[in-house]
Amino acid sequence: MGSVAAMGSLGFVLFSLLIATQANIRATATKCIETKECSAYDVICKNADYEVRHYNASKWVSTSVQSYFMEMAAYDGFRKLFKYITGANAGGVHIDMTSPVLIKKSEARNMWEPVTYTISFLLPAAYQDAAPAPINGDVHFLEMPEMYAYVKSFGGWMLSVNAKLYSNLLSRELNAASASYNTTFYYGAGYNSPRTVFNRHNEVWYIAEGKPKCSGQQT
């Protein structure tokens, strides 16, 4: 168990160093400021615990990784996707980094089984209709449908323990509100470069099923 935990810690360190040295994202303290483009949404309502957002359909570039640790999966997935946007594609073109980086975590049936994580970068507006094909067979395009998301925000770093904690909190709050949502997975969304030390912004999302339940301030 000690060696497995060490691998998880090492993976997170390597992942952080990879972003810091390769992504060339300037450090800022505000959400959705570190890249030229971010995933746009409308806030439908919000309360003290979470907010409900509407997202239009969008195209992402993605890869899936099986791992026991989110940190290891994020490192491996980010590396593959970063190579794609920096020229490992059919056109050999460089594509701007966007925010957030999405990490979809499927719920594991057994604790001893690895979990499938899907890591995704939003394609910039210029490539939403036509993007160069990936060279790596593990990288593919993902058509994200129009959707409503229940979103809970938190600071610090996107780690396995934090993502689990806040997804559990969000799930409890949604259950208390009798909200219908897909319980088979959740998204972790990270907006910051590791160079950003203070006022970091992360999120966990559950996708609403049917009409979202709003129990707060309407916007």
Image (cartoon, rainbow, N blue to C red):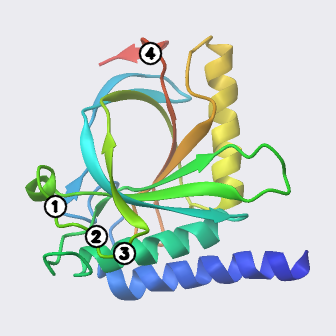
Q: Point out the tag, 1 or 3, that comes first from the N-terminus.
A: 1
Q: Nearer the viewer, mark 4 or mark 1?
A: 1
Q: Residues within 10 Å of mark 3 (few under 14, many from 20)?
A: some
The numbered disc on residue 136 is 3
Residue 8 seen in render: yes
Q: Viewer-nearest of labels 3 and 4?
A: 3
As drawn, 5 above or below 67: below
Quadrant for residue 49, please give it: top right
- What type is the residue that disc 3 sits on? Asn
Residue 141 tag number: none
> Which residue is denoted by mark 4 in the rendering?
212
The residue beneath circle 1 is: 131
Who's the residue at 44% across and 15% down the image?
A: 212
**Mark 3–mark 4 distance (CA, rounded to whole Å):** 37 Å
Residue 57 x %, y %: 25, 35
Q: Which sits in the foreground, 80 or 195? A: 80
Residue type of the residue flagged with mark 2: Pro
Vertical side of 202 occupied by 58: above or below: above
Q: Is residue 134 above or below residue 155?
A: below
Q: Are marks 3 and 2 in contact (CB under 8 Å)?
A: yes
Residue 157 visible in the shown view: no
Cα–Cα span, label 3 and label 2: 6 Å
Quarter that holds the C terminus: top left
